[in-house]
Amino acid sequence: MNELNALVDSAHAAFGQAATPADLENAKALFLGKAGHITSLMKELSALSVDEKKARGAAINLAKQAIESALNARRQALADSELLAQLQAEALDVSLPGRRRGHGGLHPVSLTLERIEAIFGSMGFDVADGPEIETDWFNFTALNTPQDHPARSMHDTFYVEGGSSTAPHLLRTHTSPMQIRHAVQHVKRYRAGAQASSEGLFSGDMPEIRVIAPGRTYRVDSDATHSPMFHQCEGLWVGDNISFKDLKFVFTDFCRSFFESDDLMLRFRPSFFPFTEPSAEIDIRFQTGPLAGRWLEVAGSGQVHPNVIRNMGLEPERYIGFAFGMGPDRLTMLRYGVSDLRLFFDGDIRFLSQFE
Ligand code: DAH
C-alpha cells in the first residue's frame, strides 16, 4: 500500500511542477498512459490469485482515481491562471478619460486680423492682398520716399536677390505699397469703363477707393517689442472729398469697436511720413483697466500726399483721401495684455492654446 501512496504522491508532485498544459499532459502519460505506472501495475495483476487480484485491483483503482483527480485539479488550476493572465493582459481601465479629437484654434494675431477685416468690412472697406517681396518703386519711390531716406538703408530693409542695382527687390518694410498697387488696378478698371484716354492722370468719375490691406512686413529689428517679421494693416480711402475729418471718424469708430470700449480716447499727434501731408501718429488711451491713463501709439496716418495720388494715376486736383497704417501685433498685445511680442512667433502651444 505504501508503494501506491508513494506513487500518488509522486504524481501530485509531477503535476504540481507542470507549468503549462503541455507539461501536464507529458506528466499524465508517465502515470496514466499506455506505458505508465498504473498500466504496468495492472498488468502485474494477472500473476495473482483471484482474491489477491480483487484486493490489489481495488487498491490500484483507488490510486488511479486519486491520480486522476490530482490531474483534473491541476488542469483546472492551469486553465484558471491562464485565464487570469489573459484578463490581466487585456485589462481595460474604464476610469481612464476617453480619447478626444484635439481641436486647433486661430493664432491670436489671426484673430485680430479677422476682427480688423470684419470691422472695416462693416464700414464698406474692401480687403486687398499683395506680394511680400516688393520692388523699390512700390515700397519707397511711388510713396514719395526720397532716395536718401534712412528707411532705405541696409540697417532697416532686407534686400533680396533679383532686381537691379537701381531697382532692387526687397521684403516690404510696410503694407503701404498696397496703396499704390490697389489704386493703380482700381483706376485702370474704371478708366477703361469711362473710355477716357489711357494716358495722363485720371480725373473722370469712378467709385471711391476704400480698402484695407493686412499682411506680413519685414524689418531688420528684434527685441521684446520688435520682430524681424511683423504684421501691418494699411488703410486707404480716396474719393472726391475725403479728408482728415473722415480719418478721425473712421479710426475712432474702428478703435472703439476693436477694443469694445466707448470711452476710449484718441489723439492725433502731428508727425511726418513722406507719403502723407499732413501726417499724424494716432495714440489711444484707455479710461479703465491695467493700461488706463497711458497714451499708446497704434498707427501712423495722414492725408495722402499729392505725389502719391499722382503715382496712383489720379489727378490730385480732383481726388484726395486719407491713409493709415497700423500694427495688428501691437493691437493684439493691448487687447489680450501680452507683454512680449516674441511670444506670438515662438510657436509655444501652451501660449497659443489660451486663445482657442
Ligand atoms: N507705413 C508707415 C510705417 O510703416 C505707417 C503709415 C503711416 C502708413 C502713415 C500710412 C500712413 O498709410 O498714412 O511706419
Image (spheres, helix red, strand yellow):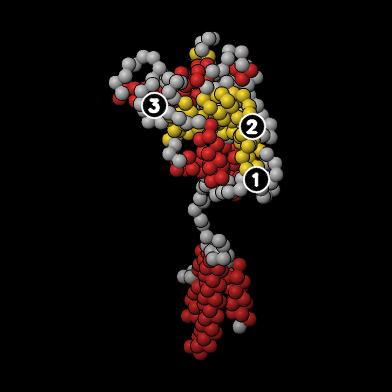
Q: In this view, does 204 lie above or below 265?
A: above
Circle 2 — which element?
A: strand
Task: Answer whether residue 234 is visible to the viewer in this image.
Answer: no
Circle 1 — which element?
A: loop
Task: Specify the label residue 209 is tagged with.
Answer: none
Amino acid tagged 2 = Arg
Q: Name the residue under label 1.
A: 286
Q: Mark 2 points at which residue?
A: 269
Amino acid tagged 1 = Phe
Circle 3 — which element?
A: helix
Please name which of the two marks, 1 or 2, marks the residue nearer to the observer: 2
Determine whether, in the image, residue 221 is placed left or right of residue 188: right
Do tag 1 and tag 3 residues touch (Cβ < 8 Å)? no
How would you rate the neighbour count of disc 3 (Cα within 10 Å): few for under 14, some for 14-19, many for 20 or more? some
Q: Residue furthest top?
A: 165
Q: Which of marks 1 and 2 is nearer the N terminus?
A: 2
Q: How far apart in space, not on screen, are marks 3 and 2 (Cα)?
A: 31 Å
